[in-house]
Image: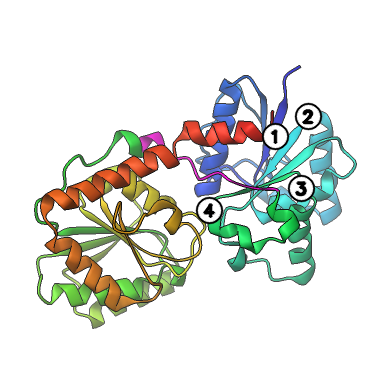
Amino acid sequence: MKIKILLAIPQLTGGGAERVVSVWANELSERRYETYVLAFSKSEDEYYINPKVQVNYVVTTLKEYLSMSYIERIWAIRKCLKRIRPNYIISFLPAMQVWIMLASIGLNCKRIETIRINPWRISVTNKVQRMLWMMCYHCSYKIILQASDQKPFFSKADQEKCVVIPNPISDLYIKSYREALDEQPTTFIAVGRIDPQKNYEMMIDAFAKVCENHPELSLRIFGRGSDDYVAEINKHIARRHMESNIILMGRSPHMENEYQKSNIYLMTSDYEGLPNALMEGMVSQLICISTNCKTGPKDLIDDGVNGYLIPVGDANELTKTIEYVMEMDPHERQKVANAARNKILNYCSQKKSINSLCDLIK
């Protein structure tokens, strides 16, 4: 009899967690597991799901879901679980994890919980909700981490259940990459939502300092954010007189092409989960400079070998590192870029990711 696996997530459109669900579900179905996906409601622009995967929704629309009481949600989810009868449930994101835990009480299935963010920065502040969220992990079968430095967040007992499975890199970026960097790098790129977490002010300050001696440099920042905060970042760019050098590009539907136009990738986050954009920059064969923030960058970048790590919030160190990279011998710079791509191909491949997952559900 086939092993039944259910992947549960609030929706199938959006960010990295949703993409991982689509990749894992599609790969599991190809490996002859009986695979299901459960979401709260149907969304527009959902990630592609193989027809072999049975996609289920608690209700038809988000409006309908939000109108339900807590008890109604639990019973609706439990009804889905009793109909599917999965052997394993892999849950993503706090909103779904808590409901799955409550709805699966007494059912014969093993829950595998995932961490998709920096756990110290979880947005669940309500004491009861936070207690329930932590309980999800404490009474789970296994815990899937994105990065090794997420493990200390958990108790010693729960750490025994932790397994690190990095996000699988999309084939889109594997197939589309820059084979050779320009002999003299002038084009920089940053990717991520326009949010205080990303500390773009620090990036702008450091880049402005470098531009004092290199006015030909350009930095394109891709991502969306609240109108108010985007306006604040544009004001900061203006204060540093960088309007001709630094441009907020908004969101691009073809980021694989944008990486190809660039030489150096910058990330100045104060914290992360496992940064997909950093993985994309590395596999696109760019020189990547990132803050050594919790969590994720140090699992991807071996400092000085396939990229560069700097202290969180240190604009001076970012300036020095950019200048160091620009002054490198072109062959040495290309060597670092090649090593970046090879690291992601080996560490974050879809095959390795799904093999690690299958080891948990034998």
Identify the amino acid type marked 4.
Answer: Ala
Does the residue at mark 2 contact the one at mark 1 (Cβ under 8 Å)? yes
Q: Which mark is residue 6?
A: 1
Which region shows up in magenta?
161-172
Label 4 crowding class (10 Å Cα cut-off): few <14, some 14-19, many 20+? many
Does the residue at mark 4 contact the one at mark 3 (Cβ under 8 Å)? no
Marks 1 and 4, how far apart at CA: 23 Å
Residue lying furthest bottom in this view?
239
Marks 3 and 1, how far apart at CA: 15 Å
Identify the amino acid type marked 1.
Answer: Leu
Label 3 SS: loop
Marks 2 and 1, how far apart at CA: 8 Å
Marks 4 and 3, how far apart at CA: 19 Å
Label 1 SS: strand
Q: Which residue is mark 4?
A: 147
Marks 2 and 3, how far apart at CA: 19 Å
Locate residue 130: give its quadrant: bottom right
Q: Quick one: label 2 or label 1, which is nearer the N terminus?
A: 1
Marks 4 and 2, how far apart at CA: 31 Å
Report whether 181 appears left or right of 116.
left
Q: Which residue is mark 3?
A: 140
Vertical order, 84 against 157 (above or below): above
Label 4 SS: loop
Residue lying furthest right in this view?
106
Q: Which mark is residue 84?
A: 2
Residue plotted at (59% across, 27% down):
28
Identify the amino acid type marked 3.
Answer: Ser
How many numbered marks does the figure carry?
4
State the quadrant of the N terminus.
Answer: top right
